[in-house]
Image (cartoon, rainbow, N blue to C red):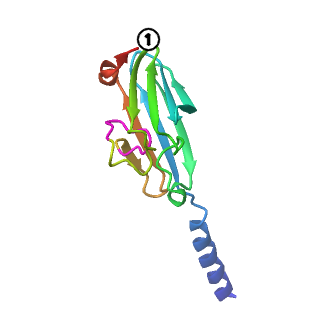
Amino acid sequence: MSKIVVFALIFIALGCTFFIVPKETFIIKNETSKAMKISFFSKSVLLESVEIEAHKQFQKTIKEVGRLGVTSPFNNRTDSLIILFSDKKYLSQYCQGLVFYGNFGKCYYEKNLLDFASSVRLRKKISGEITNIITFDESDYQKAKSL
C-alpha cells in the first residue's frame, strides 16, 4: 500500500510541472506628454495599430512563447511602422522593404518593437514568466519629425 502512495505522490509531483505554461508579457510604456498611435504595415497595407494615451501603457501577454518562437505581440509580416504622436509628430522604422523578422541584423532601431531585443527584460525564476518593457519618453518625442 505504501508503494502505491509513494508512486501516486511522485506521479502528482511530476505531473504538476507540466501545468506550468511559460508566458511572456510585452509592455510599451508611453511616458511622453502626448498620446501615440503605433501602426504596423506590410507592403503599405495596415496590419494593425495600437493607441496609447500619454503616461499610459499597452500590455499583451502571450502563452507558450518558447514553443512558438514569438518575440513580439505584433504581426511578423511587418516591414515598416510609424509612431504618430497626437500633435502630428512621428517616428518611423523602415528596413529597405524587408520584413523585420529574420532581418534584424540588417536594420537597427534603438527601440525595436518587433523583437523587443532593446527592452528591459524581467524574468520570474519559479514561474518562468517573462516581462519585456520598452519605454518611449520625452527624449524619443524630441527625435520625432513633423508631418
Numbered circles on residues, count: 1
- Left or right: 11 with respect to 57? right
Q: Residue furthest top?
A: 87
* Residue at 35% across, 18% down: 145
Q: Characterize the local packing of mark 1: few (<14), some (14-19) or many (20 or more) Cα atoms within 10 angstroms.
A: few
23 drawn magenta = no
Q: Position of residue 61 (x, y in %)?
A: 55, 44
71 w.r.t. 133: above or below? below
Front residue of 70 and 94 = 94
Q: Quadrant of residue 84?
A: top left
- Residue at 30% across / 18% down in the picture? 142
Q: Is residue 55 visible?
A: no
Question: What residue appears at the point 52 percent right and 54 percent down from the top-left corner?
Answer: 65
Looking at the picture, does residue 48 appear above or below residue 68? above
Report x, y in % for residue 98.
Answer: 43, 43
Q: Residue at 63% across / 83% down in the picture?
A: 7
Q: Secondary structure at mark 1?
A: loop
What amino acid type should be assigned to the residue bearing mark 1? Answer: Asp
State the image coordinates of residue 97 (x, y, percent, origin top left).
Answer: 43, 39
Task: Identify the residue position indicated by label 1 in the image.
Answer: 87
Query: Looking at the picture, how far across and down is residue 117, in whole percent?
Result: 36, 46
Closer to the camera, 37 or 98? 98
Most foreground residue, 17 or 29: 29
Question: Is 115 on the left or on the right of 8, as rendered?
Answer: left
Q: Main secondary structure of the magenta part?
A: loop
Residue numbers of the magenta segment: 108-117
